[in-house]
Image (cartoon, helix red, strand yellow):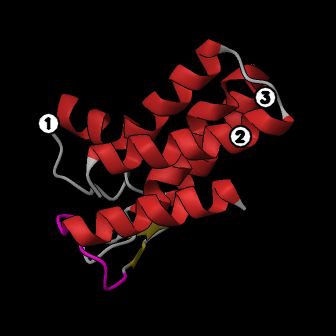
């Protein structure tokens, strides 16, 4: 998905969490950064897009667990990372261990991006 889709969808998740567990401004910013982190890491390390180590659910879940133990207010970074991976289950796919998970969605298709945003907004209003 596009970076805008990742950002808007993560903000909707944060809005849902904030309703039950008040979040600080730092947690919100870190969560949005986490939703873009896999792509930022790949670009800054000059790795191929959808790298099997960066776009991997094991990496995301490890990040979520470690940050939750170190500082509970930073759990949104790991949550954003895992959410990014969930949204990236498209034709390009992401990894779960050594296996690649794919779907018929296309990340560059504007309609598919809008569909994901609308789906997240629907859950906010529910």
Q: Position of residue 12 (x, y in %)?
A: 57, 45
Name the residue at the right extreme: 20
The crowding category of the residue bearing disc 1, from other C-alpha atoms within 10 Å (few below 14, some 14 to 19, many at least 20), is: few
Looking at this view, is 27 or 18 the one in front?
A: 18
**Quarter of the image holding residue 76?**
top right
Of the numbered discs 1 and 2, the one sitting upstream in the chain is 1
The residue to which callout 1 is attached is: 46
Q: Position of residue 38 (x, y in %)?
A: 36, 42
The residue to which callout 2 is attached is: 65
The crowding category of the residue bearing disc 2, from other C-alpha atoms within 10 Å (few below 14, some 14 to 19, many at least 20), is: some
Q: Quadrant of the N terminus?
A: bottom left
Relative height, residue 21 to residue 91 (above, below): above
Mark identifier at residue 69: 3
Name the residue at the bottom extreme: 104
The crowding category of the residue bearing disc 3, from other C-alpha atoms within 10 Å (few below 14, some 14 to 19, many at least 20), is: few
Q: Position of residue 49 (x, y in %)?
A: 19, 53
> Is the residue under label 2 in contact with that under label 3 (CB below 8 Å)?
yes
**Quarter of the image holding residue 36?**
top left
Left or right: residue 1 versus residue 76 is: left
Of the numbered discs 1 and 3, the one sitting upstream in the chain is 1
Mark identifier at residue 92: none
- Residue in view at x 17 percent, y 64 percent: 108
Mark pair 3, 2: CA separation: 6 Å
Mark pair 1, 2: CA separation: 26 Å
Residue 112 visible, this angle: yes
Circle 1 — which element? loop
Residue 59 visible, this angle: no
- Residue in view at x 25 percent, y 71 percent: 111
Looking at this view, is 115 or 86 the one in front?
A: 115
What is the span of residues highlighted in magenta in the rendered image?
A: 103-109
Circle 3 — which element? helix
């Amino acid at each position: 998905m596009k970076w805008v889709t990742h950002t808007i969808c993560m903000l909707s998740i944060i809005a849902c969490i904030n309703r039950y567990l008040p979040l600080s401004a730092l947690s919100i910013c870190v969560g949005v950064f986490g939703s873009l982190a896999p792509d930022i890491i790949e670009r800054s390390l000059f790795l191929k897009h959808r790298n099997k180590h960066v776009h991997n659910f094991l990496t995301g879940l490890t990040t979520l667990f470690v940050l939750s133990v170190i500082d509970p207010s930073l759990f949104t970074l790991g949550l954003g990372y895992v959410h990014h991976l969930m949204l990236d289950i498209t034709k390009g796919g992401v990894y779960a261990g050594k296996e690649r998970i794919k779907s018929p969605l296309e990340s560059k298709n504007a309609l598919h991006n809008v569909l994901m945003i609308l789906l997240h907004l629907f859950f906010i209003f529910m």
